[in-house]
Amino acid sequence: MDRQDDPAAPGKRLLNRELSWLDFNARVLAIGEDQNRPLLERAKFLAIFSTNLDEFVQVRVSGLQEQVAVGARGRTPDGMNPLDQLRAIRARMEELVGRQAAVFTKEIAPALEEVGIVFLRWDELDDDDREYLVEVFDAQVFPVLTPLAVDPAHPFPYISNLSLNLAVVVRDPESGEQRFARVKVPQLLPRFVVMPDGERFVPLEQVIAAHLDELFPGMEVLAHHPFRVTRDADFELEDEDEDLLEAIESVLTLRKRSGHVVRLEVEASITDEVLELLCRELELSQQDAFVIDGPLDLSGLWALYALDRPELKGEPWVPQTQAVLARTEPPADLFRVLRSGDVLVHHPYDSFATSVEAFVDQASRDPDVLAIKQTLYRTAGPASPIVASLVRAADAGKQVVALVELKARFDEQANVERARELEEAGVHVVYGLVGLKTHTKILLVVRQEHDGIRRYCHIGTGNYNPVTANLYEDLGLLTTDPELGADLTELFNYLTGYSRQGRYRKLLVAPVSLRPGLLARIEREAAKGADGRIVMKMNSLVDPALIDALYAASKTGVPIDLIVRGICCLSPGVPDLSENIRVRSLIGEFLEHSRIYRFGADAASAEYLIGSADLMPRNLDRRVEAVTPVTAPALRARLDEILTINLADDALAWDLHADGSWSQVPTVRSVNTHRRLAELAKARAREAWAPDART
């Protein structure tokens, strides 16, 4: 049999991780291309696409470039070496960035102009507009600009990561000699200068370009070209046995000041000579330069989305409070609520503020609470209500432990700041385990009650962050289950002390029991053949061993549905390999972020698990994760409802095909998961509470 026809051959058994991620970002871009969506929503998704791509280049592309530089030739599970991947990534990125530039310049910008939001070039301004911008330049821009010449006495300047710059060519009128200079567009200033009417925008680099004669007096400005540099931002700690806080602060300094150049972005007007000079001085191949037929750095469109134009946006969602959480006299007594049964919260449909934040707030004020222990992976800014509650609890003399994960990529600075704030308040701050990133989302409250000590728990899929809780779809279980309370106690002891805990009563914990626990459940369903059932919802599916287990289950006839928002290396629908596996992805207003794992054909008796872990080697082997069973019948029914709606969606859903391509699901019934779950949340907020509704 020809190797390419073998269903287990590389490229069929497993899809490439990096190209799968680019497919995910292509689905994000497709929302910006959707002409049926409100204009500012489309602009927002172009901004999200840009930010996503920046992070991908800084981490994933930079890593592949380093592998090529040291001569690494190892192949990924899908059969590609680093150079193969870089070539494929380059081609795909070029296509996607071209699509983004085209949809902005040809569709979104003209459509915005029709509703009074206009992007202007300097040469399109009248005298009054230019006079206004001259005042802005003189007062706010000129004082912070630093033109840097390049000549034998002035070496090529350091170009900082993600900075927008102008490459300027000037000529000395006396000697006739041409010189090159660089002007950095200040990152602290808005990407677009807003005109006094609040609805016309001029790119900041064009305002600067119009005043280059003031920066180079006596010289003749021949040309100017915007360019943008992306550097490697994936720095590893050299020795995690050092003080971790100091080590992370060193990494943050390195990220700002070093890292090889990974990508150069230039506008299409650039000359070959200037492009060649930039590539040479940045020590970059022209294969890593992207010529863009449009403005650079469309992440700046977030500023546009901030405009007060509600008619150009989607209808804002107001998170609801479940009736069960509001049943007691205000303020709600969440301890009393949880003593009567478990509560499942589903953000952003259910309010984070009136559930998780309110729970921590009540615990911080309750005189009977003895201790609060919590993990914090992505903290919020200085106004974080949960951090404020932990500080208040420590001030009240409670035992407060916060495990702050300093290695949460691109959130390190915020986490360092919150960690110092907590330490100064007397909170016992722990920074995680050597060699393992603590990704689990767990909270334990220990309370003295009339019948003894009771432990209240929250185990979630998302961060304890009020900003992302309104944007990310996540789940959390609030419970007083004694076995889960005991498991969390032992897990926190493992995280804060010296422990070799290997067994838990109910929790599946990585890197100890999660991988074998999931494999055992997949194998259990595989043994049932067509009478089995597996449904999984996650962010990413990469792990080869878990994928092979799913393939094996498919071969026995188990129907398998996978809802994977981002990376999926499993190839569905391949004859004799994955005929019984279907994969879909939902992309829409909220970022799908929850992980739900269902095993069993009968919804009423199936096992449901939720938690923080995706099916990736890093989650299963190199992170601390916790996944919990949800056992209350009403809550399991709610999880089944979520999965059923996800699988019925034909408004936000995309299908993955055996050849690795994705296509949008044709709209027939107009089932929109986000809208349907919002409707159910409103109904749940109105429904009467029954004492046994959650048991």
Image (cartoon, grey):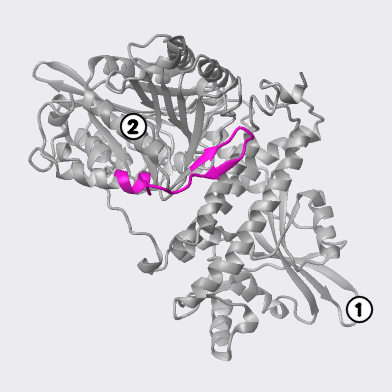
Disc 2 from disc 1: Cα separation: 66 Å
The local crowd at label 2, few if under 14, some if 14 to 19, many if 20 or more residues have their Cα within 10 Å, is many
Q: Nearer the viewer, residue 376 or 270?
A: 270
Q: Which residue is mark 1?
A: 176
Locate residue 598, reporting x and y percent.
38, 23
**In the rendered image, the vertical position of residue 95 relative to residue 476, given as above or below:** below
The local crowd at label 1, few if under 14, some if 14 to 19, many if 20 or more residues have their Cα within 10 Å, is few
Instruction: Specify start and end residues of the magenta stretch as a single range.
Output: 654-677
667 in magenta: yes
Residue at 66% in and 22% down? 7
Looking at the image, residue 624 sits to the left or right of residue 628; the answer is right
**In the rendered image, the vertical position of residue 553 relative to residue 256, given as above or below:** above
101 in magenta: no
Q: Nearer the viewer, residue 182 or 319?
A: 319
Locate residue 585, reporting x and y percent.
49, 39
Residue at 54% in and 67% down? 108
Q: Which residue is mark 2?
A: 427
Residue at 58% in and 79% down? 138
Upstream in the sequence, badge 2 or badge 1? Answer: 1
Helix, strand or loop at label 2? It is loop
On the rendered image, what quadrant is the N terminus found in? top right
Quarter-of-image position of residue 312: bottom left
Looking at the image, residue 655 sits to the left or right of residue 477; the answer is right
Amino acid type of the residue tagged 1 in the rendering: Gly
- Residue 254 seen in the current view: no
For the image, the number of numbered tags is 2
Amino acid type of the residue tagged 2 in the rendering: Val
